[in-house]
Amino acid sequence: MDPIGLVNYATAFVFSCALAYRANSFTFTPLTLVFGLATGISYAFGFVLVVAGMRLSGIVVTTAVIGLSMILPILFSVIVWNEEPNLWQTLGILIALIALPLLSGTTKSTQDTNRPTWYAAPKFGLIVVVLLFLNAGVGRLAMKGFNEMCPSDQKPMYLFFLFIVTTVPYLFICLRKRQLPTILELGYGILIGVCNLLGSGMFIAALDRVDALIAFPISGSGGMLFTTTVGILVLGERLNKRLAVGVVLAIISLILVNLDF
């Protein structure tokens, strides 16, 4: 997976450089640097956690946990930037807190008898879920922080710092292991890199126009519903009762926090 990670973030980095050059925007404040690096670290660490989460619990549960991480920036927006959730959004946040503990576990389709016994231990699953949740939440919070506290014309430099800090670690890892991406890995990496850049850029643009209370839930719920459909119908993932309840609660939570009335 390391070569895919390298190609993924290197592709996004090259495009971010092109955006900065085209916009002729090379100035930045210290906060732009800090938020860019913070988001980049979250992305780099998140790639590892997503792989671990998918091997442990499958793509449906992993996506549900990442979707629920929108709680962190929403709570921060309420406390720091005085955005006010309505009754439905508050209920959605409470349901999300119930769903999270249910999402720690192993799906039948990801069980592997050759793995160490500690890998399937409940505590290990809980640790992965908590780290996924916190890491994704911090990354989204850094995006919101940039949007609130930095000039909007510094977005190209924000993306530059974001993707350079994600590219460098994977470059060192691949050089150390002497790994080169295959043609297939190049294709996957470039596709994911373009999606990463477009997703980050569009999400920051969305935060310019709508509150975080709307932007984060819409982003999470759309991806959650799509991934659940693909995971179950296409990939054939089988969820036990506990995980199924957790996923259903996560979807309900994301729908509720989208209700803006």
Image: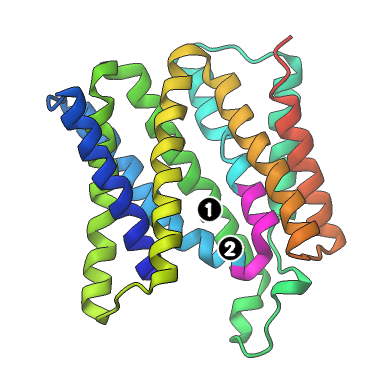
Residue appearing at x 51%, y 55% in the figure: 131
Q: Position of residue 134 (x, y in %)?
A: 50, 46
Asked where in the image residue 244 lies, by quadrant, the reply is bottom right
Residues in magenta, as a range: 55-65
Circle 2 sits on which residue? 53
Instruction: Give the alpha-carbon distance from disc 2 to disc 1, as whole Å.
Output: 8 Å
Q: Note whether residue 134 is visible.
A: yes
Q: Is residue 113 left or right of residue 36?
A: right
Q: Would you place residue 160 above or below residue 106 in this image?
A: above
User: In the image, what residue type sits under mark 1?
Assistant: Leu
Q: Compared with residue 148, is residue 94 higher up or lower down, i.e. above or below?
A: below
Residue at image position (49%, 45%) is 136
Badge 1 marks a residue whose secondary structure is helix
Check disc 2 and give the amino acid type. Answer: Gly
131 vs 96: above or below:
below
Instruction: Read off the residue under disc 1.
Output: 132
Classify 10 Å Cα crowding around label 1: few (below 14), some (14-19), many (20 and above): many
Mark 2 vs mark 1: which is more N-terminal?
2
176 displayed left or right of 251: left
Residue furthest right as drawn: 241
Residue 21: quarter of image: top left
- Residue 51 % position (x, y): 52, 65
Q: Main secondary structure of the magenta part?
A: helix
Marks 2,1: beta carbons within 8 A: yes
**Residue 34's spot in the image, x, y percent?**
24, 35
Q: Identify which residue is drawn at 75% across, 29% down.
A: 255
Q: Position of residue 31 (x, y in %)?
A: 22, 27
* Most foreground residue, 210 or 183: 183
Residue 37 appearing in the image:
no
